[in-house]
Amino acid sequence: MISKERKAQIARENGAKSHGPTTATGKETCARNAITHGERAQALKLIVPPHSACLANEDRQAFYKMFDNLRAKFRPADETEQALVREIADFQWKAMRNKQTESALFNRELMRQATRTPGSIPELRDLEISLAAQEALTGNKTIAELRKDTQTCLRSITQIQRRLKELQKTWPAADPVPPPAEKDDLNEQTNPNSENTAQTYDINGPATPNVVNLYRDIFRKNDASTVTEPRPSGSGR
């Protein structure tokens, strides 16, 4: 039988042979040896370092997706406007959290009232539970503070948007678009030697007189081209 001293010596010898993990995965695993539960490790990863807008149990990717959408909407031109857009994102995220927290409070009270409300008509049970939860939460200080803070966030968003628009007014104006060329100008540019029939026939005047004059000139030209010269007198067949 091996004595305790011999076991301790063997453990020391085996420990001296180990140089620790060599791969990145092994080192990361050993760094979390004190944490035995995966959810705790994930929560600790979110807390360190702390995020300026998201809490430990909130999705940072969802926040940055919202932030990217706001940047695409307001198109910040410099770091100052970028910071204003970030403030809008922070207040909007906080307002969303307040509404979710208020909903969670109502859901928790609904579950409480479901166990306290006695059995009644099945069609009316859900309504009775909702009324009981509403009455229990009437005057709740937490909900009142959440709603007050949400209104503050919305006012702050409005003020920041106003400041952002004022800054964006200082951007250089775009070059004005030249007006489209008139039809007569286009005709003169493409064929300066062509006759301008719009001056001979008023296209903006009454339709009937212009049509009559136009066809009269056409027929005159055709008649002049088809007239034959008279035969000389005294000529026989």
Image: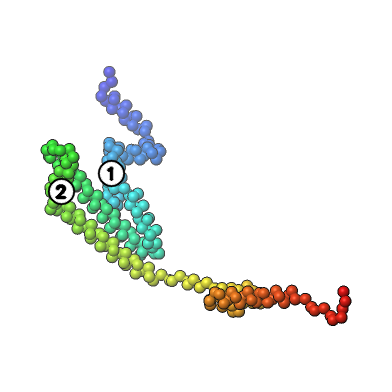
Q: Is residue 119 above or below residue 159?
A: above
The residue at which mark 1 appears reads as 43
Is residue 135 something that shows in the picture? yes
Residue at (15, 48) in percent of width and height: 134
Residue with the most extreme top position: 1
Instruction: Find disc 2 in the rendering and name its residue.
Output: 134
Q: Is residue 80 above or below residue 97?
A: below
Dot 1 crowding, Cα within 10 Å, few <14, some 14–19, many 20+: some
**Residue 108's spot in the image, x, y percent?**
18, 44
The answer to whether residue 109 is visible is no
Q: Which of the 4 image quarters holds residue 200?
A: bottom right
Q: Quadrant of residue 6?
A: top left
What is the number of the mark on residue 51?
none
SS assignment at label 1: helix
Residue type highlighted by circle 2: Gln
Residue 128 on image: x %, y %: 15, 43
Element under label 2? helix
Instruction: Please state the horizontal and vertical placement of residue 229, each as a whole percent of the image.
Output: 79, 78
Q: Nearer the viewer, mark 1 or mark 2?
A: 2
Type of the residue with mark 1 = Ala
16, 233: nearer the viewer: 233
> Horizontal and vertical percent for residue 107?
20, 44
Tag 1 near tag 2, CB within 8 Å: no
Say whether disc 1 or disc 2 marks the residue closer to the N-terminus: 1
Residue at 84 percent of width and 80 percent of height? 232
